[in-house]
Amino acid sequence: VDDFGALQMSGGIVTATDLTVGSMTAEATMTLATAAVATDTLGQATGFRSSGGSGLVTINGGTWENQELLVGGFGAGTLIMQSGATVSATGPYQVFAGAPALAVGYSSAGGSIDIEGSVLSVTGDADIGYAGAGNLSISAGGSLSVTGTLDAGAISGGSGTLSVSDSGAVMTLGDYIV
């Protein structure tokens, strides 16, 4: 989905090897409603390098299944999960050797994930703020599960922020590095 493009699904299934939302010079969006399912090997909510593109993915009760998920890969990216949405990053596909199953803020453009009453499951490692600013917030009874290590601010230049805003929110981690 590219350059002012939009994919809106209220039902059905879309399957792709590389599902990229936003890649050139403008924002692109993808919205999945309750009965919609998207599956892919590499899911990206991102812009393309420094050209000003960005990606916005809203999962409103739908499901997005990925092997690897980049939010804010080469440009700015945002993932909003609400109304019982389910998003997964199951590995083991790797863009590069040692890549985590989930990377938020992979580049200096940054990325963010808002989990509002929804579930994000990561099988493997998750980097929040890999080389740029990464933000992950959990609210309204949402949950995050990471079987590997959650790393906030993975390398030089990276900064990760995690916020949990209510007592019903849950974070289950295999390990963490801050």
Image: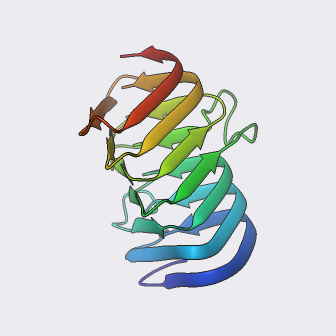
Q: State which quadrant residue 57 falls in.
A: bottom left
Residue 122 image offset from top left, x and y in percent: 60, 37
- For the point 40% across and 53% down, which residue is it? 117
Q: Residue 3: x, y in percent? A: 45, 81
Residue 66 visible? The answer is: yes
Q: Residue at x 51, y 48 (%)?
A: 119
Q: Is 66 in front, or is 36? A: 36
Q: 140 and 6: which one is in front?
A: 140
As drawn, 4 above or below 62: below
141 vs 74, left or right, is left
The quadrant of the picture occupied by the C terminus is top left
Task: Evaluate whether residue 130 shows in this view.
Answer: no
* Camera-side residue of 160 and 136: 136
Q: Residue furthest front?
A: 168
In percent of width and height, residue 25 lies at: 39, 74
Seen from the viewer's position, the closer of residues 175 and 111 is 175
